[in-house]
Amino acid sequence: MSRADLIPYATLLLRIALGVLFLAHGLLKLLVFKPAGTAAYFRSLGLPGFVGYLTMAAEIGGGTLLVLGVATSLVAIGLVPLILGTIVMVHGAKGWMFSNEGGGWEYPAFWAVALVVQALLGSGAYSLGDRLGIGWL
């Protein structure tokens, strides 16, 4: 087996990791902070409260689709603005290192790059999208 033969499995691993991260963030907003609390936090940032609801939906829906491997490239590239928004609205002012108080922009920047890589690679192995004939997404 060559390294090229392993690319679909590496892509799968990246896809699952990204999907689980988005699910964890979305479910944290839904189950711990609650939708009203999430909306209030987004209002505290100067954004309309409904953006909090949209963010939860994007994180939970996008995470689920990534884990399943459905429309992977479209979902991954579609989530990039969400992550870049966290840099602009929250983490950018905290400095580079994510270990800074309030979390810097190091981690979200890496997350955005990983999403672009996922979009370029596609779904990888064991993709429901491939089984449905939409693996090119």
Image (spheres, rainbow, N blue to C red):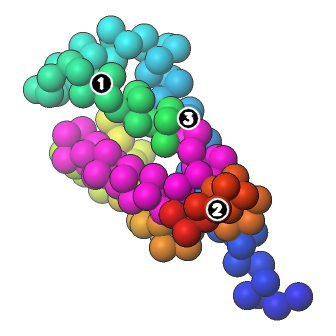
The residue mark sitting in front, 2 or 3, is 2
- Whichever of labels 3 and 1 marks the residue nearer the N terminus, that label is 3
Who's the residue at 58% across and 61% down the image? 134
Left/right of residue 47 with respect to residue 95 in the rendered view: left
Write the start and end of the magenta stretch as one range: 63-90
Left/right of residue 8 with respect to residue 78 in the rendered view: right
The image position of residue 117, as x and y in percent, is 48, 70
Who's the residue at 11% across and 26% down the image? 46
Residue type, label 2: Gly
Who's the residue at 14% across and 27% down the image? 47
- Whichever of labels 2 and 3 marks the residue nearer the N terminus, that label is 3
Instruction: Quadrant for residue 53, please give it.
Output: top left
* Residue at numbered disc 2: 133
Residue type, label 1: Gly
Q: Quick check: is 24 in the magenta stretch?
A: no
The image position of residue 73, as x and y in percent, is 48, 62
Q: Quadrant of the N terminus?
A: bottom right
Label 1–label 2 contact, CB within 8 A: no
- Whichever of labels 1 and 2 marks the residue nearer the N terminus, that label is 1
Label 3–label 1 contact, CB within 8 A: no
Give the crowd class for mark 2: few <14, some 14-19, many >=20 residues within 10 Å.
Answer: few
The vertical placement of 75 against 56, above or below, is below
Between residue 132 and residue 86, name the one nearer to us: 132
Q: CA distance from mark 3 to mark 1?
A: 15 Å
* Residue at numbered disc 3: 23
The image position of residue 61, as x and y in percent, is 50, 36
- Residue 14 in view of the camera: no
